[in-house]
Image (spheres, rainbow, N blue to C red):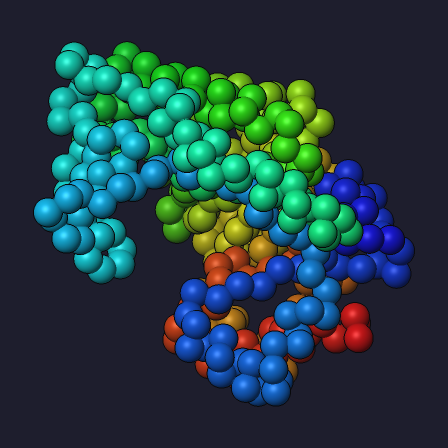
Amino acid sequence: MTEREILHNSLRHKPNPDNVVPYTVGFDCPVLQEKVNKHYGGNWWLKVRQFMHSPFSVNTTREMPIEGKPHYAKDVLGSIWYTGKLPWHLEKPALSEPSFAGYTFPTIDDFVGDLEKNKTKQYAKEQYEQRPELFRLINMGWGIFEQTWRARGFEETMCDIALEPEFYAELVDRIADLYVQMIEYCADVDADAFLFGDDWGSQTGIIIGPENWRRFIKPAWKRVYDKVHAQGKYVISHSCGNIHEIYPDLIEIGLDMHESAQPEPPGMDPFELKKQYGDKMGFWGTLGSQSIIPFGEPDEIKAHIRKLKKEMNVNGGYILAPAKPFQPETPVENAVAVIDALIEDLH
């Protein structure tokens, strides 16, 4: 079976021949990746088995440098960011008040105009044709909830939800309208799934609370997920943190797979989640980037990954990966232990 067929099986909750476990791995630190390559005597380990690729992305923020102001950029909503160091800082939200008076809301052309100009669809088509065996992702970046606080500022958004619910609901709806149009724009892209990002969770729970999430955010994403499924594509959504309270809601509106699935927060134990929801929704991640990867012993890491492979991959619905890309403080021997365990059955 090709990697694409394996992932289709997994997303349909079907077992794969020989219990192949799809996996991904990434780095947030080029220096660490160089050290790992040095350990292996090259980057051959990257090519043992690649399962997916994503040559097509819709930039949902589109930050443009501000002339005469080094280290500052304006995003597509009109918010100004300080970009001089990571993480970027939201300097001036586009909407200083909970009102649309005098504000010109961006259109779909503001988001995808550069894709048309740069012939990105044609490039993606060529890339897909070169590697037809790989699973094809369309990456959509920042999500609807995140766009609301990009437009208003984070603290202001928390206040809007409590004090200006009608304004906040309209803001969410307008952003959701744009996302629906973005999905429509991608209808002719021959991909398998959309990967969205929208951080709903903190370490302790849903940032705006589950009831507010259900009131404002859930209906917006349902519209988007429905549009994706109408194209015959899968929905994969990223969220950090503790979101187990809304798993039944995500299943209800059609989420096929949750990416990241951090195992450290309360209620996010992957083995329990698999038992409770594994026949209805998939999990991508589950290997602790805040726990076992930086602080475990290499043998402990390998044993844990073998357990994840055995228990999480039952009837598919699983992509094994660190919950976050390898961080700079990751010991080289621990990164190597992760990779050894991921590829040990494949070569």
Q: Quadrant of residue 216?
A: top left
Q: Quadrant of residue 50?
A: bottom right
Camera sees residue 34: yes
256 in relation to 40, above or below: above
- Taking the view exactly as shown, the residue that stands out farthest to the right is 17
In this orientation, which residue lies closer to the viewer: 101 or 236? 101
Q: How many marks?
A: 0
- Taking the view exactly as shown, the residue that stands out farthest to the left is 68
Camera sees residue 138: no
Can you say which quadrant of the picture contains the C terminus?
bottom right
- Residue 47 at x, y percent in the picture: 69, 69
Q: Is residue 63 left or right of residue 310?
A: left
256 in relation to 292, above or below: above
- Residue 8 at x, y percent in the picture: 77, 42
- Residue 303 at x, y percent in the picture: 67, 75
- Residue 305 at x, y percent in the picture: 66, 68
Please tell me which residue is depicted at 46% across the width and 25% down the height of the picture: 179
Please tell me which residue is depicted at 14% across the width and 37% down the height of the picture: 92
Q: Is residue 150 left or right of residue 190?
A: left
342 in relation to 118, above or below: below
Please tell me which residue is depicted at 16% across the width and 12% down the height of the picture: 101
Please tell me which residue is depicted at 68% across the width and 35% down the height of the picture: 190
